[in-house]
Image: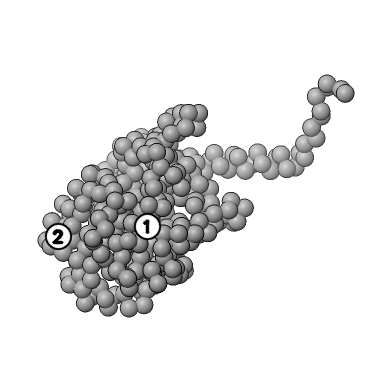
Amino acid sequence: MSTAATAITINEAKAEKFAEQMLGIINHAALALMTSIGHRTGLFDAMSKLPASTSAGIAEAAKLNERYVREWLGAMTTGRIVEYDEKTATYWLPAEHAAFLTRAASPNNLAVTTQFIPVLAGVEDRIIESFRNGGGVPYSAYPRFHEVMAEESGQTVVAGLFDHILPLAPGLTEKLRGGIEVLDVGCGRGRALIQMAAKFPNSSFTGYDFSEETVGAANREAAERGLNNVSFEVKDVATINGHLRFDLITAFDAIHDQAQPARVLAAIAGALENDGLFLMQDIAGSSHVHKNLEHPLGPLTYTISCLHCMTVSLAQGGAGLGAAWGEEKALQMLSEAGFANVVVKRLPHDIMNNYYLGRLR
C-alpha cells in the first residue's frame, strides 16, 4: 500500500465562493460591533434627525469626539449603512435604514441585538478554556448581559405583551383584570411583570430570579412607580415551595438556561392551580440542526447558546440545555413535567420566539 499522501481535488469555484463568504462574515462581524457602538453612543438617533452633515456636525449633535465619529462613519459608509457625498464631505442615514437602527424605531431596532456580539466576545478566553476542560462560565462574567437582555426583551416581550402575547390565551386578559395570582420565573429586571402590575391592579404579581442585581433593580423600579401589587425575590425557581399556587405562571426566555430545567418545569407544574396556565416564551427552532438550516437567526441562536445560555447552566453543574433546545425537546420536557395540554403559537412579527401555552389537563 502506498504511503504517499492522497491528492485532494478542490472545486475551485466552490472554494472561491466560500472565500467570498468568509470575507463577508468578517466584514459583517466588524459592522455588528460598530453598529453596537452606534446604538450605545446614540449616533444613529442623532443622525436620523440630521440632514446630510459633516463628521464634525454629527459629532457635535451627538456630543461625541469628532475623530472617533469620523472613523466610525468610515465603517458605516463602506458597510453601506450610512451614505456619503464626496463633493460636500457629508454623511446621512437613510430613513429606510433608520427604521431598523434607532430607539424611535423600537420594537424594530435591530441595533439593540448587535450588542450581544461584544458582550459575548468578552468571555471568549473563558469559553475556550471550557472547550478544553469542560465546565462553564458563570453569570458573573457577563457585566452587561442583563442590561442588554432587558433592552432586547423590552422590544420583544414588553412591547408586545398586551396587544399580542397575552391575547394568545383566550380569556386571560379578562382574568387579569378581575384579579388572579401571577408568578414570573427568571424575571430578570422585572419589566414585563411591572407593566402587567400597572395594567392590572386587581391581580398580584411575584417575580423570582437568582440574580440579586436584577431583583434589586426590579424592586427599586416597582417602588419608584408606587406599585404595591408586585414584588421580586431572589429564589431558585427549581425550589418553589409546594404550598404556593398560582393562576398564571410565565417564563420569558428563561427556561433553557436553567441549571436544572426539568426540575424547574416540574416545580412550575406543581405550583400551578389545576385550571391554571403556564405561558412560556422561548427560542423558536428545531431540536435538530438540519431543520434549522433555513432559520433566519440560526447562527446567532447557536452562538448565544454556546457563549451564554449553555455555559452558564454548565457552570452550575447543570444540564447545559442551551437556547437551541428546540420545539421538539421543549414539548417533550413539558409533557414529562406534567403538562397534559400544550399549544404552540407564533406571532407574525416575531421571528425569534415560540409561545407555549401549557395546562395540566
- Left or right side of 110 for 132: right
User: Residue at point 46% right, 62% down?
Assistant: 335
State which quarter of the image contains the C terminus: bottom left
Pointer 1 local density, CA inside 10 Å: few below 14, some 14–19, many at least 20: many
Question: Number of callouts in the render?
Answer: 2
Can residue 150 be seen in the rendering of this structure?
no
Q: Is residue 282 above or below residue 134?
A: below
Q: Are marks 1 and 2 in contact (CB under 8 Å)?
A: no
Q: Earlier in the sequence, mark 1 or mark 2?
A: 2
The quarter of the rendered structure image containing the N terminus is top right
Residue in the foreground of this view, choosing between 84 and 25: 25
Q: Report the residue at 44% width, 68% height from top.
A: 340
User: Can you tell which quarter of the image residue 69 is in?
Assistant: top left
What amino acid does circle 1 point to? Ala
Q: Position of residue 289 (x, y in %)?
A: 58, 51
**Residue 326: x and y, percent?**
50, 55
Residue 138 in the image, given as x and y percentages of width and height: 35, 37
132, 333: nearer the viewer: 333
Q: Nearer the viewer, mark 1 or mark 2?
A: 1
Q: Report the front residue among 143 and 117.
A: 143
Residue where numbered disc 2 is placed: 225
Instruction: Determine which residue is flagged by label 1.
Output: 266
**From this viewpoint, which residue is outermost toward the top?**
3
Q: Residue at x 17, y 53 (%)?
A: 219
State the residue at coordinates (41%, 65%).
Answer: 339
In the displayed orientation, state which residue is furthest to the right: 1
Please provide percent x and percent y for residue 86: 48, 45
* Apparent side of residue 357 relative to residue 228 in the rendered image (left or right): right
Between 222 and 24, which is closer to the camera in this rendering? Answer: 222
Name which residue type carries label 2.
Arg
Q: Assess disc 2: are there few (<14), some (14-19) or many (≥20) residues with their C-alpha within 10 Å of its C-alpha.
A: few
